[in-house]
Image: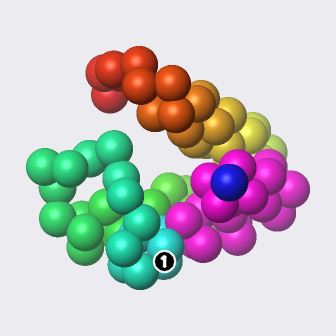
Amino acid sequence: VSLVTCALETDILSLTGTLVSAFTVLCGARTDLPDRHVCCVFWLNIAAALIQILTAIVMVGWIMSIFWGMDMVILARYKEQGIPQQL
């Protein structure tokens, strides 16, 4: 449920959903990158948020945030159904 909320925030406000998801990793949220340290996943999300905000001027960041949100929802549904996925 919180992942869908982050996806919707990402679609609506470009930057906030990605930032919220970055900080939820620090609070113990599970990730799809178990072989990476929590700080690495946090900084990957922060980098994605910065790329979104820096490229929002030319709408690329906004479009990227929509795809990022769709990916979060798709991965969450796969995880709920127990379907293995490759990243």
- Say left or right for 68 vs 82: right
Residue located at (33% from left, 44% from top):
32
Task: Name the residue at the left extreme.
Answer: 35
Q: Against 17, is 87 above or below?
A: above
Q: Nearer the viewer, residue 58 or 42?
A: 42
What x and y, as percent, mark residue 48? 50, 56
Q: Magenta segment: does it hold 6? A: yes
Disc 1 residue type (three-letter): Phe
What x and y, as percent, mark residue 61? 69, 49
What x and y, as percent, mark residue 23? 48, 77
Q: Nearer the viewer, residue 24 or 1?
A: 1
Can you see residue 73? yes
- Say left or right for 56 vs 45: right
| Magenta stretch, residue numbers | 2-21
Dominant secondary structure (helix, strand or loop) of the stretch shown in magenta: helix
Displayed quadrant of residue 77: top right
Query: Label 1, on which residue?
Result: 23
Q: Nearer the viewer, residue 42 or 81?
A: 81
Numbered disc total: 1
**Quadrant for the C terminus in the image:** top left
Q: Magenta segment: does it hold 69? A: no
